[in-house]
């Protein structure tokens, strides 16, 4: 009897040991690219973000080390309920480990809660709201490419310094627009400027005429466009038709992407000032990635900041998985390891991740070139100023993230 029991215990111990080894060496990961595939932000994110994720998988070198990595795609249609449903299905049924991109801040914040509940990894480069690393921060989330604090303090402060000390906002009526107006108002007033008013066009507005008329009537020196994607393109085009710039007021594109400038064309976009954290022609690294990206895009577009952020965030994620030797399914442990590890890639160079989940890297104030200054396709930006990483984003002592109160 004793021998039988001993043999059974030995067999059980061996089985448990084998099971633990298999778990520790589990080299599978599933990436969920969740974004707008066909609507307002499709050019900013869309298929380009899917390509960026696929390029990160290829460039990680993990396949040669025995890893199996899959990429799945979901279209949230800029609706929080759809985004939440996709995220839950991915975690519960499809065993997705990490969700990336997620533009539209209302969707981004809703998905943030799901990822925390499911103990996944959330690498957001698409949503702008700085709340993702402040009031609504999560231990499972890293906010990667840009945010409203960085946009506001880059563009807002620069415009006030150059004499634009009175503002009127055209603000997209959802979480991103609200956060961008809030953060820009704080930056403007801190510099001694004044906000004279604002209007809130609904998301995906086709006709901005009544809103632009109110902005024009306000006599504000600067009209701040706290919107994005197609809304930014339409509002700038219609402002040009209204003769607003010719009348002496300036437009501040508080969130602009290279896809927006391309859609507008240099004759309309010339002279616009805005802040970005990525531009394809910044250095050898950004040029190398961007040209490879462009070759594989059907429309031959250069990558946006969001798409570059998808690539960069996943490169760091894959480096972390490799360092951990497997077991890619405990989101909290992975994010903790990602925060503890310095970042370094060809997109943003060397950087760090704050305890509140905010990824730090420099930001750049750009001005759109005049048509005669452009040397060829996609040569659109002039670099005006570089904002160091430690100045570009919310300082930790000003962050409202609950994770910092431990």
Image: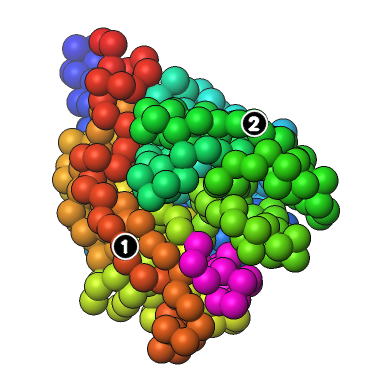
- Residue 176 visible in the snapshot: no
Magenta stretch, main secondary structure, is: helix
Q: Which residue is mark 2?
A: 197
Quadrant housing residue 176: top right
Crowding at label 1, few (<14), some or many (≥20) Cα neighbours within 10 Å?
few
Residue 348 rendering spot, x and y as whole percentages: 27, 58
The quarter of the rendered structure image containing the C terminus is top left
Q: Which residue is mark 1?
A: 384
Residue 304 rendering spot, x and y as whole percentages: 47, 64
* Span shown in magenta: 258-272
Number of the front mark, 2 or 1: 2
CA separation in Å, label 2 and label 1: 28 Å
Vertical comparison of 243 with 200: above or below: below
Left or right: residue 302 versus residue 396 is right
Residue 38 rendering spot, x and y as whole percentages: 71, 61
Which residue does the image show at 55% across and 46% down from the upper left?
222
Lower sequence index among marks 2 and 1 = 2
Quadrant housing residue 276: bottom left
């Amino acid at each position: 009897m004793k021998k039988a029991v001993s043999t059974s215990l030995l067999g059980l111990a061996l089985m448990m040991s084998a099971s633990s080894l298999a778990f520790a060496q589990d080299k599978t990961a599933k990436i969920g690219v969740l974004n707008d595939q066909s609507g307002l932000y499709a050019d900013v994110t869309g298929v380009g973000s899917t390509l960026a994720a696929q390029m990160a998988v290829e460039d990680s070198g993990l396949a040669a080390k025995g890893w199996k990595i899959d990429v799945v795609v979901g279209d949230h249609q800029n609706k929080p309920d759809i985004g939440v449903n996709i995220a839950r299905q991915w975690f519960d049924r499809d065993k997705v480990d990490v969700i990336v991109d997620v533009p539209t801040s209302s969707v981004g914040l809703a998905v943030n809660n799901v990822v925390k509940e499911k103990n996944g990894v959330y690498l957001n480069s698409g949503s702008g709201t700085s709340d993702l690393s402040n009031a609504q921060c999560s231990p499972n989330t890293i906010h990667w490419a840009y945010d409203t604090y960085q946009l506001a303090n880059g563009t807002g402060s620069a415009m006030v310094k150059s004499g634009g000390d009175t503002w009127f906002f055209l603000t997209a009526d959802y979480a991103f627009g609200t956060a961008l107006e809030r953060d820009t108002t704080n930056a403007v007033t801190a510099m001694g400027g004044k906000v004279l008013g604002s209007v809130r066009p609904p998301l995906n507005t086709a006709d901005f005429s009544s809103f632009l008329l109110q902005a024009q009537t306000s006599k504000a020196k600067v009209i701040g466009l706290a919107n994005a994607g197609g809304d930014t393109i339409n509002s700038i085009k219609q402002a040009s038709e209204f003769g607003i710039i010719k009348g002496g007021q300036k437009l501040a594109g508080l969130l602009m992407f290279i896809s927006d400038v391309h859609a507008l064309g240099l004759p309309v976009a010339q002279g616009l000032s805005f802040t970005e954290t990525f531009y394809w022609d910044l250095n050898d690294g950004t040029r190398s990635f961007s040209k490879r990206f462009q070759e594989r895009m059907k429309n031959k577009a250069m990558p946006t900041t969001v798409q570059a952020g998808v690539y960069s965030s996943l490169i760091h994620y894959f480096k972390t998985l490799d360092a951990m030797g497997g077991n890619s399914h405990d989101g909290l442990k992975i994010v903790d390891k990602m925060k503890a590890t310095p970042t370094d890639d060809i997109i943003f160079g060397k950087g760090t991740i704050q305890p509140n989940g905010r990824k730090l890297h420099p930001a750049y104030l750009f001005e759109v070139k005049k048509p005669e200054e452009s040397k060829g396709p996609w040569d659109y930006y002039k670099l005006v100023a570089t904002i160091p990483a430690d100045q570009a984003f919310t300082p930790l002592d000003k962050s409202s993230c609950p994770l910092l109160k431990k």
